[in-house]
Image: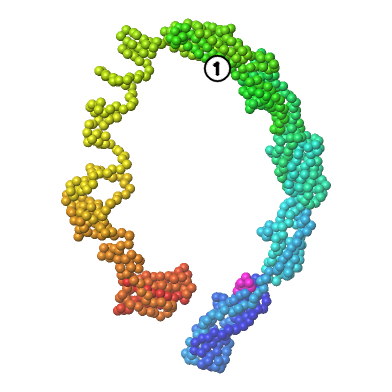
Amino acid sequence: MATGKSSSFEVSGTKGVTGKIFWSETYDTRTNTSVVTITNLQFKNSNWYGFTYYLNGSLKINGTTVVTFSSIQGSHSVRPSALNTYTSVNANGDYAGAPWGTVTVNHGADGTGTCPIAIDVTGIQVNDQGGSGWKVTGTTNITLTNIDRTAPTISCSISNITADGFKITANSSANVDLWSYSLDDGITGNDFSTTANTSASTTVTGLTPNTTYAVRVAARKTSNYVYGESSAISVKTLGGAALNSVSTVTADNATVTITLNVTVYEPSYTHTLALTYGGTTHLTITGISGWAKGTANRTITLTAAQRTTLLSTMASIKSFDMNFDLKTFSGSTQIGNTSTQKGTVQTMEANSGPSMGAFSYCDSRTNTVSVTGNDQYLIQGHSYLQVTPAQATARNSASIVSYAATCNGVTASNTTGAAIDLGAISKAGTLEVVVTATDSRGYTVSYTREVTVLAYAKPKIKEITLRRTNDIEAEMQLIFNGSISSIKPASTENNSLLYLRYRYKPTSETSYGSYTSILASATKNGINFSFSNLELCSLDSNISYDFHLQVRDQLNSLSSLDLYYVIPQGTPLVALRKKKVGINTPNPEASLHVVGDTILDGAVEVNGALSATSLSGTLPVANISGTLPINKGGTGATTAANAAKAIVNGQAIAPKSISTTGSQYWTDGVYGLHLNNGDIVGINGLYFPDAVDSAGEGINFYRSSTTWDRLYSHSGTLYYAPNIATATHPGTRYTVYHSGGATIPVSKGGTGGTTAADARAGIGVSVTSLYSGSLSSGSTTFNYGNYNFYVIIAKPKSTAGLISVTVPKAAITTTATKYQVADETNYLTFNLSYSGTTVTLAYGGSSYAGVITKVYGIN
């Protein structure tokens, strides 16, 4: 313990007595504490001397009683020998004299400290003379020695970094006696020296390679046991090489290289590189060495076997991202963790694309080849194009997976390279055929050739006449001309008519008869032909026939023109039958049966019923007798009233507007619209085109058979007049007040104003300031009889916010009543009472300098 301060202080008492307390201190810098002792107690008296006073009371240090005086037992006494002269206290008998107490006092974190010393002593003279009963009481805070609590300044450095450790060297600005380090930024300490010095060092081992540590050093100052701490240093142990990036690898180059950007920490280590994809390692390169320390691009050249292995891995892939896993070894021990980066491994079409020779093609349809005489020519729409690819060759471990042929937008394919059928080609001319082979990586090779497709269409009949002679005879006439397509692969025309024939059957039958050929009778001119025969055959004129004409060229059934006609029975213009005449019909069904339109010039008289499927034109009303029903387009009535009743009565109608006869007044016993006790819905607006202040106008609510409750407008004011008969502007009426600016008087339940100020004035509400200031003691008065409420505004603390209290007049009595305002920490009280016509507000007290600032009266 070190010797600290010693001093004394005076405490004034009663009856001219003053006490003086002497104290001393020792302190401990390591525990940041002081021990305080009272070394003496003296008294002086300015009024009496020569009297012996026995003391009663105690002395306290930091709240701890260090000595107790008992006047009854006479434990301690003092006898001043002269006026105003300090005399020390005597301990009587076995009672302890000064010094008193060894009280330990804790200092603050900054080393400062204070300590309260309290005295509470009364002096008693046994004869009750010399001012007996004087009293000295009070507390004084003494200031203790300021203890050094400064921490040492610590710094550290790192050296000798290895894969599993490094050396820490630390320095201090002051002598320290305990050193420790942490590798986790100060969380976990490890003591490494207890030698008092200003520097220390230690070597840390057993760490994880390629791992970053946050190193701090803490040290305890010898003099005060206060710790200082260095800033953190980030240290990474040596470890496996770090793979930073991988350049794209072209696996099908003649010489394959892998370029890696690698940071090497220890050049003596060796490395292994593994290429993985889909969780499988496809290529491993071991024994990589000779990489210098630092960050640089490192190139690895694959052997032919390694190149083949890599290409086999991507036999069906053009390009993909692989994981490049780099491991570092010291001998057979792996250093650190595997460093991994993704890199692209690719092939190039120029290096790995397949090759293929020319393909062959032919028309695979024998029917069309027999016409052209050469399977290298195709007939549009009928020849079948067949393509046979040449065998394609894949490269660099790939394989051919498909062959495809395309012509005129049609594509077919297979996986074997066998012949590919493209079917009939719908377009004529010189067309391109493309054959494409695709390998397992998706690379393709194509070969293109041209094929000739001869234009072709089936035979055509341009004009034809097929009829009965005179349209009624049994004798048939047939005249037509047509053409066929030219099929000329070279200079010789290969196409000609093969069939030109007809057959027929009665329409009522299902089977045709045999064909009759007319090919020999036809006139042929190259690809054009014609036929004419006015006596082709005889068909019964009383029945109709189905007639089939067929034209075929050398494609025979592949391209046949089949025309079907119906030959009607022979129809005379006029048919005379027993009691019947038919016009344009051989079998009349009535006395006169006309098929077709009829025009009559003159009147038609009907002595029987007239029926028609439909009528067009106008039918004169004068020619109609009786009523025309609604379902026939009439009204069902012969008068306007009955017609309106039949059409409208009981119906929901939607007229655009309704206009009634004017001046129809209910007061006159008439009306314009009667809804028969029905509702009006969907109305948008109700308009009165002139003033509605005459008798019966406005909106009238039934009151009795002769009177109404009436709502109407007069000169811009809305009125309600109850139980009115016919008065125009009745005397008994009430104004309907609204928000349009009119005032509602107080007598009608309003405020008599249209602004807040006018409303308050209208209903007699006013606020009067009765006090304004800062009342912190004493009282203030104001009128009692003129107000209904009082509002007192105060602050429970001079710097606090305002708080208001509203007190009804009836709550104030002739007896003072206490009120309080408070916030979370402070309070203020006041009393209210009245006498006669005066209210008294008396300040009560406050926990911390509260004030009353305003008082208002509300009537």
| Residue 684 located within the stretch drawn in magenta | no
Residue drawn where x is 49% and y is 87% of the image: 14
Residue 603, how many percent across, how many down?
A: 28, 20
Rendered view: 840 above or below 641 = below
Q: Secondary structure at mark 1?
A: strand
Residue 65 vs 260, above or below: the answer is: below
Q: Is residue 107 magenta?
A: yes
The residue positioned 27% from the left and 19% from the top of the image is 605
Q: Quadrant of the C terminus?
A: bottom left
Residues in magenta, as a range:
105-111
- Residue 299 appears in the picture as rendered: yes
Residue lying at 23% horizontally and 56% vertically, measured from the top left? 693
Hey, which residue is sitting farthest right in the picture? 290
Q: Closer to the camera, 103 or 828?
A: 828
Q: Is residue 394 left or right of residue 471?
A: right
Taking the image as drawn, is residue 193 in sight? no
Is 83 on the left-hand or right-hand side of 442? left
Please name the residue shown 76% across and 55% down the image: 165
Amino acid type indicated by mark 1: Lys
Query: Looking at the image, which is closer to me, 591 or 649?
Result: 591
Tell me where residue 302 sits by quadrant: top right
